Image (cartoon, rainbow, N blue to C red):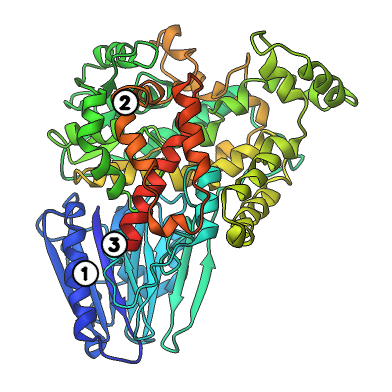
Amino acid sequence: MCGVYGIFSPSERLSATERAWAAEAQARLQHRGPDGQQTIELMEGRCLLGHLRLAIIDLAGGAQPIGNEDGTIWVICNGEIYNYIELREKLVARNHRFSCQSDTEVLVHLYEEKGPSLLDELEGMYAFAIVDLRKGQLLLARDRFGEKPLYWSRSTGGGIAFASEMKALLPLPGLDRSLDVAAVAQFLALGYIPAPRTQLNGVRKLEAGEAIVFSQDNKISTIHYWHPEFPAPNGHRPPSQEEAVSEVRRRFRQAVRLRLRSDVPVGAFLSGGIDSTLVASTVRDLMPGTAFSTFCASFDDEQLNEAPYARQVAQHLGSEHHEVHFSSADMLEVFDALIEHYDEPFGDVSMFPTFAVCRAARQHCKVMLSGDGGDECFGGYREFFNYSRWQPVRRFPGVHWAAGSMLANWNSRWKGRGLLAFLTKTDWQLLYPEAERQSIKQLFQPGHQGTASQGLQELRDGAVRHARLSFPLSAMEGTANGYLPEQILVKVDRASMRSALECRTPFLDRDLFAFAAALPVGYHFAAGQGKALLRRCLPDWVPPQIRLRPKQGFTPPLATWMRTSLRAHLESTIANLPPSLRAVLNTGPALELNRRHQAGEDCSTDLFRYLVLYKTANTATAC
C-alpha cells in the first residue's frame, strides 16, 4: 500500500515547474507512505516516477520504483497483488530473475511477457503505472472493483501527470480548475461523482477495471478489461443451495487466505453484522493459535450502536477487541479537515466514524480486513430485499394502477406505504428514479442546465445497460459498478490511508464474485431479507440475533447533530456559497432545506451533500 505519482512527456524534457510539481505532489501524499519515498527519472528526463511506501511485504527489499533486468520496464504500484507467490513461481520457471521478494515485482516480469494483458492474471487491489522504455509508452491501470484510486491530467508540455489522490494534482502548472458542472449534477444525484469525472474539468480518474495507454505520439487508448456483471440465466442447471453454500465457503476461505499474506500484523473490522462476522471467524479458523485484533465503532444512540453484537462475536473468537466510541465532539474535531482530505465532494457521513476506527486500528495493526463488498455481491441492501417476495405481484397486469390509486389516498402514518410505492413502479423506475433525477436540473442557473442535463444523461445511459436484467439483479449490478467503487471503496481508502492503514476486502475476490453472481437470484433472498446465502455460510455457533439481524448502516445520528452541535457550522457554510458555485447553482434550495430540517423534517442527507460540495469546490478551485 502506497502513494504513487508521476509525469510522462514523450517528446519534451520535464520543465523546472513540472519537477517542482513532483516535489509538491510527494509532500501532499506523505500520509499514504510514511515508511520510505523514492523517485526516478527516465527517458532522458522526460519521465519521472515517484513512490511513497507503506511497507507490508518484503519490508527490507521492496522499495519502488522497481525495474526489470535490463532497466527497460519500470513500475510503481499502490496496493497489493495477492496472488504474487503463484505468479512469481511461474515466472521464475520461465527464467525471469527477481531482485526482491516484493509482490510488486511480478508486474514488471508479467508485463514483459504479456504487455497490458497482464491485467487478466492479477488478483489484487492496485493502481499502478508501468513505463515501457522500448515502446516509449505509459500504462496506467486500476483494479477490477476499484479499491485503489488513480487520478490523471494532461500536463502543459502535452504529456500526462497522475497521482493516487487528486490533491497531488492540484498544483500542476496550467491545470484547468474550472468547475465541471455535469459532475456537480451527478454528485447532487448520487452523493459521489462517478469516474471518469471529478468536480474539476482538468482532472479525471480511471474507472474500476480500466487501463489507459499513453503512447509516444501523445495519444491515449483506453482498455476496459473487466466490470462486475450479473449474467442473465443461461438455462444451465445451477448448483443446489447446499452446494452453493459449500462453494461460497470454500472460495471465501481462499480469498481470506490470500489477503492474510503480510509481513506485518493483520486485524479485522467487526461490527457484529453478517459480513464482518464471516470475515473475522474465517480469520480465526485460518489462524487458530494466533492473536489478532478486532475493532468496532460505538455510538451513544442505542438504535445505531452495533458494539454489543461485535463484542459478542469477539468474545467467542477470543480476539483482542477494541471499541472506539464516536460522538459529535469527535466529528467536529476533524470535520473540515476530513472533508477536505477527500478532495472530491463526498456525501457519506459514515466517513467520520470510519476514520475514527481506522485511526485507532493503526495503533495496533498496519493491515485490516473488512466486510465491504458483501452487500453488493450477495444482495444486502434494503431496496433489494425489503419487498422481494412481492416481485411476482408487482409484475401482474393492473397492479401498478391499483397500487397507485391506493397510495394517493394512503395516510402517511399508516403502515404499508413503502410496499405500495414498490408496487407502483416498473423495473426501470426501481433502477432509475427519472423524476427525481430530472428535478436536479432545476437546481442550476439557466445557463448551466444544459450541461447539468448532460451529466444526468450519463447516469441514465449507465442505468440502461443494467436494465437488460430484471430487478433486483439490475440494481445489484448497478450498485457493484457504481456505489461500490465510487462511494464505499473511496470512503475506506481515504479514511484508512489518512492513518497509513491498509484495508483488504475478501468479498471482492474475482472467483468468489463470479460464482455468486451466476447463482439464481432467489438464493440471495429469503423471508424478506437479503444475504440469505451468507447467513447460511456463517459458522454454526453464530446466534440467531446476529445471523438474522437486518442490515444496519455505519451512520452517526447526523439529523440530530445538524439541529444541535453542527447547526452553527452548517448554517455558516451554506450561507456563504463559494464564488465558483454561485455562478452555477441557485442559492435558495440549500437554505430551504435547512429551514425544513430545523422545523423537524429530516433533510440531513441532502444538506450534507450541499455542505461538502461547498467546501470541496472552494478548496479545489482556489488551489
Q: Toward the viewer: 411 or 290?
A: 411
Please tell me whether mark 3 or mark 2 is closer to you in this view: 3
Describe the element under mark 2 as helix, strand or loop. Answer: helix
> Hey, what amino acid is under mark 1?
Gly
Q: Quadrant of residue 204?
A: bottom left
* Pointer 1 local density, CA inside 10 Å: few below 14, some 14–19, many at least 20: many
Q: Toward the viewer: 532 or 551?
A: 551
Q: Do the residues labelled 1 and 2 touch (CB within 8 Å)?
A: no
Q: Are marks 1 and 3 in contact (CB under 8 Å)?
A: no
Describe the element under mark 1 as helix, strand or loop. Answer: strand
> Hey, what amino acid is under mark 3?
Cys
Left or right of residue 402, residue 104 in this image: left
Residue under pointer 3: 77
Q: Where is residue 405 in the image (x, y as percent from the top left)?
A: 84, 20
The dot on residue 280 is: 2
* Pointer 3 local density, CA inside 10 Å: few below 14, some 14–19, many at least 20: many
Mark 3 or 2, nearer chain start? 3
Residue at position x 29%, y 73% from top? 172
Left or right of residue 162, residue 509 in this image: right
Q: Quadrant of residue 179?
A: bottom left
Mark 1 or 2, nearer chain start? 1
> Hey, what amino acid is under mark 2?
Ala
Give the spatial CA distance, label 1 vs label 3.
10 Å
Q: Position of residue 456 (x, y in %)?
A: 62, 53
The dot on residue 50 is: 1
Mark 1 or 3, nearer chain start? 1
Residue at position x 41%, y 8% from top? 543
User: Compared with residue 110, is residue 156 higher up or lower down, i.e. above or below?
Assistant: below
Residue at position x 34%, y 15% from top? 305
User: Compared with residue 595, is residue 611 higher up or lower down, i.e. above or below?
Assistant: below
Q: Is residue 73 visible?
A: yes
Left or right of residue 176, residue 234 in this image: right
